[in-house]
């Protein structure tokens, strides 16, 4: 063997008789071969989804002539054709914007006169698809595998207290601080006991808003509604409330005071408007943070048993969304942002009224809301029935005697029910069970 040449093949065998393995020495000068690299698959870039087309704003199709007047007449008015200070997705075009058909029934809203008033306090997708090859479906047998029983019509669910299913449904009109009258009306319907506690089991109770202002004790009204909400839930029912324009007014007066807000007729302030619309200093002094938080989260509208519940008899809700959830979210988000001009615009639109009073256009306006948000009949407060019927010339009834109100007012081809009995004008605080019976 040559030194350094490495082992050479031999003809020797191993100890067990097997031939010994032959070795060869690799040439160190030869290049080392590497396996070819596996080609890498290239993936096409993911397509960029196109931005969804902007949904066109929808104007209200039914605008009865001069039938949505502001709440605080007959005082100085503010033109209703000013552009909205902000845009709401899905809203109708702002006043004066391209494509907007001015509603002749939307008159000016009130701008408080200047006063030296003190500020009081601060679809489901289709799934991942098939993973197996489609197979033809076998035809089902013609005969049932079990005997079929005759279909028997089921009776309507009993809504009386104690029966299975939801309990009876009640609604309450505007209270406006008349605490004692509210206790009497709830007691007469069996909803509370003599101590003012919930006594209606699984009944359902909706307040349509406007708890404060004009009357003597709005904070006690709010405390009662909050307490009944907890007690009713514990008993298997519920007590809920909607946002009224006076809740918006009180919240604005508390938060913004005399801070000027944009107005088509000049400047205005929440505090001045609150004082001129029945604001009670005792309510402001007793208003606590938990009251503010509770009011700020109230819904603007709801649906129950085919009834569309809302506070104001206006079509302005259409400017805030095309579903109940969208409207409620928009109102809550507006209050949470805390922009004074946005909150003022919200309050201003919630003060409109009489959208359903016109003999011809009223039913069409009511149907537009029902088609958009659901329900067969809408139920509202806001406009006192005597004022709605033209029996008194103002919401306070200062130019007329005590009106006679026996119950809710059904109108607009039976599509609308007015629930404000005019307690502020010596009328009646209404608490009624739905559906209404003749």
Image (cartoon, grey):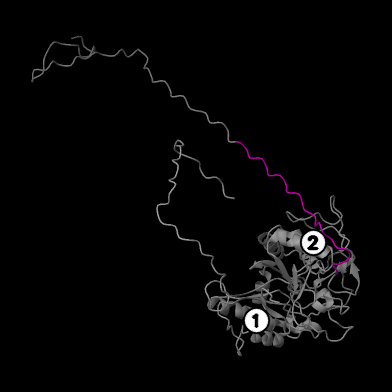
Check the image and name the residue furthest to the left: 16
SS assignment for the magenta stretch, majority: loop
Q: Is residue 53 magenta?
A: yes
Q: Is residue 141 magenta?
A: no
Q: Is 314 located above or below residue 13 in the figure?
A: below
Label 2: how many residues lie within 10 Å, few (<14), some (14-19) or many (20+)?
A: many
Give the CA separation, mark 2 to mark 1. 38 Å
Check the image and name the residue furthest to the bottom: 194
Give me the disc on residue 364: 2
- Comparing 270 with 417, the one in front is 417
Image point 90% across, 65% down: which residue?
Answer: 265
Image point 90% across, 69% down: which residue?
Answer: 77
| Rendered location of residue 180, percent (x, y) | 70, 88
Work out whether residue 118 can be spotted: no
Secondary structure category for the residue under label 2: helix
Q: Is residue 40 left or right of residue 336?
A: left
Quadrant for residue 1, please give it.
Answer: top left
- Comparing 366 with 102, the one in front is 366
User: Which is more N-terminal, label 1 or label 2?
Assistant: 1
Quadrant occupied by the C terminus: bottom right
| Rendered location of residue 61, percent (x, y) | 81, 56
Q: Is 102 located above or below residue 2 in the figure?
A: below
Quadrant for residue 165, please give it.
Answer: bottom right
Work out whether residue 396 can be spotted: yes
Q: Is residue 170 left or right of residue 391?
A: left
Give me the disc on residue 223: 1
| Rendered location of residue 193, percent (x, y) | 60, 88
Q: Which residues are magenta?
A: 47-69
């Amino acid at each position: 063997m040559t030194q350094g040449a490495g082992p050479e093949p031999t003809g020797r065998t191993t100890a067990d008789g097997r031939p010994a393995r032959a070795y060869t020495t690799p040439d160190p000068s030869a290049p080392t071969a590497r396996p070819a690299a596996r080609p890498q698959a290239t993936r096409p870039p993911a397509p960029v989804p196109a931005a969804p087309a902007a949904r066109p704003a929808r104007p209200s199709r039914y605008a009865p002539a001069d039938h949505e007047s502001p709440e605080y007449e007959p005082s100085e008015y503010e033109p209703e054709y000013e552009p909205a200070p902000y845009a709401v997705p899905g809203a109708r075009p702002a006043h004066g914007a391209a494509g907007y058909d001015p509603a002749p029934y939307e008159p000016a809203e009130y701008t408080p006169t200047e006063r030296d008033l003190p500020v009081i306090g601060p679809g489901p997708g289709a799934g991942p698809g098939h993973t197996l090859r489609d197979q033809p479906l076998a035809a089902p047998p013609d005969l049932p595998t079990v005997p079929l029983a005759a279909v028997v019509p089921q009776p309507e669910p009993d809504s009386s207290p104690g029966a299975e299913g939801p309990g009876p449904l009640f609604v309450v009109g505007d209270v406006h601080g008349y605490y004692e009258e509210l206790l009497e009306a709830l007691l007469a319907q069996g909803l509370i006991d003599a101590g003012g506690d919930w006594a209606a089991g699984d009944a359902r109770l909706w307040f349509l808003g406007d708890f404060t202002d004009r009357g003597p004790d709005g904070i006690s009204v709010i405390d009662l509604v909050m307490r009944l909400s907890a007690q009713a839930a514990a008993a298997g029912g519920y007590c809920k409330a909607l946002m009224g324009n006076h809740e918006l007014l009180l919240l604005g007066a508390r938060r913004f005071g005399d801070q000027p807000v944009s107005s088509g007729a000049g400047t205005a302030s929440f505090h001045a408007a609150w004082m001129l619309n029945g604001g009670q200093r005792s309510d402001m002094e007793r208003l606590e943070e938990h009251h503010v938080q509770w009011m700020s989260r109230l819904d603007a509208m709801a649906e129950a048993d085919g009834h569309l519940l809302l506070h104001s008899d206006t079509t302005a809700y259409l400017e805030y969304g095309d579903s109940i959830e969208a409207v409620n979210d928009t109102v809550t988000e507006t209050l949470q942002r805390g922009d004074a001009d946005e909150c003022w615009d919200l309050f201003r639109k919630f003060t409109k009224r009489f959208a359903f009073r016109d003999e011809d256009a009223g039913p069409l306006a009511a149907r537009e809301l029902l088609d958009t948000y659901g329900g067969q009949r809408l139920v509202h407060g806001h406009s006192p029935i005597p004022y709605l019927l033209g029996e008194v010339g103002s919401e306070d009834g200062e130019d007329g005697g005590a009106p006679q109100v026996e119950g809710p007012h059904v109108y607009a081809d039976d599509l609308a029910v007015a629930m404000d009995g005019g307690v502020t004008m010596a009328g009646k605080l209404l608490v009624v069970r739905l559906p209404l019976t003749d």
